[in-house]
Amino acid sequence: MNDEETKVRAAGAVLWRPGPDGAPEIAVVHRPRYDDWSLPKGKLDPGETTVAAAVRELHEETGFHVVLGRFLKQVAYGVPGPDGGTVGKTVDYFSARAVSGEFTPNDEVDELRWLSPPEAEAILHRRGDVETLREFCALPADLTTVLLVRHAKAGKRDEWTGDDDLRPLSNAGLRQSDGIRAVTTRFGPTRVLSAPRLRCVQTVAKVAEDLGIEVAQEHLLSEEGYWADPVLGLARFLAIVGDGGTPLLCSQGGVIPDLVTQLAERDGVELELRSHVTESEQRRRPAPAKKGSLWLLSFRPPSGNEGPRLAAATYFASQLPSPSPLNSAKGE
């Protein structure tokens, strides 16, 4: 189902927490309107991204504040439209770890249960929810999230007469940086790093400001630093991943495609492209990296003498809200 056919857009998540034995427990919710057991989800508000909608809906339905993890899948199906016909609906699902809060029955959800994955699968009503839960279970729950963004728009290089290192974001780029801030904060970044270009630093500066930290500049994430020794550049990137936390890194269009492609080929990961990606971008190798785009990378933790290994990679071409969905559609 393509974007032209989709009239209703929604977002949700597999909400999890570590159980007493360390294995993940899954939150499933009962919706009295439909008398079914479901993964928490809901429609996008006008001017809202799927990332923001997933976090908001989880809090409204379950009472929990969450940190998002990897993108899981998109489920598409038809629902009754306002004119009596059928319109397309898509739901984008993420992994989401509960960090605080508690459940209180509300108009949308009257019961929440924390269950093991097999128990959760057994009571879920919709096939799409079951498939999403299985996708979640295909990898460890507590992967390391890395947010790799390309700097936002900074005008044309040939129209800038000063030092190119000091070329600032344009007005459009400032809007993109606000979108990047709004999206990436939902994944709980703990560190902010950037290639030493003003436009790169400006792209993620507000996230660092929110965290009360400085943007750490990484020469090996710049185009000239990376291509002077790509093996060293990749090793530095993996060292950043291995340091733990949730790093947000801003780099350039001459670095990100090669870096992501090298990781994917090394670790046998298929690249997932999301959010208004053109056919040419779908076919492009190496990986795409539009200005203001995000690669959501998930890594297995180091084990023995082996460093971090890429487990999943999802590309979001834009962090700005897409056109408003048709929220008047009826039904689930």
Image: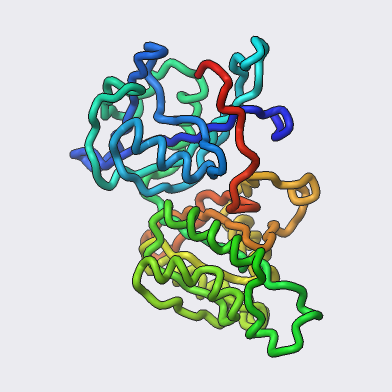
Task: Name which residue lies at 53% across and 61% down.
Answer: 178
Say which quarter of the image contains residue 197.
bottom right
Of 244 and 109, nearer the camera is 109
Provide residue 253's location: percent of width, then percent of height: 68, 68
Say which quarter of the image contains residue 250.
bottom right
The quarter of the image holding the N terminus is: top right
Task: Name which residue lies at 65% across and 52% down.
Answer: 317
**Residue 315 seen:** no
Say which quarter of the image contains residue 108.
top left
Q: How is the image coloured?
A: rainbow
Of 270 and 89, nearer the camera is 89
Provide residue 295's location: percent of width, then percent of height: 57, 56
Of 313 and 138, nearer the camera is 313
State whether residue 26 is above or below residue 281: above
Provide residue 110's location: percent of width, then percent of height: 28, 20
* 104 relative to 144 in the view: left or right: left
**Residue 87 seen:** yes
Task: Name which residue lies at 46% across and 68% down.
Answer: 206
Task: Name which residue lies at 63% across and 53% down.
Answer: 318
Of 64 and 148, nearer the camera is 64
Number of numbered discs overlaid on the protein picture? 0
State whether residue 278 is above or below residue 150: above
Provide residue 109's location: percent of width, then percent of height: 32, 23
* 19 relative to 133 in the view: left or right: left
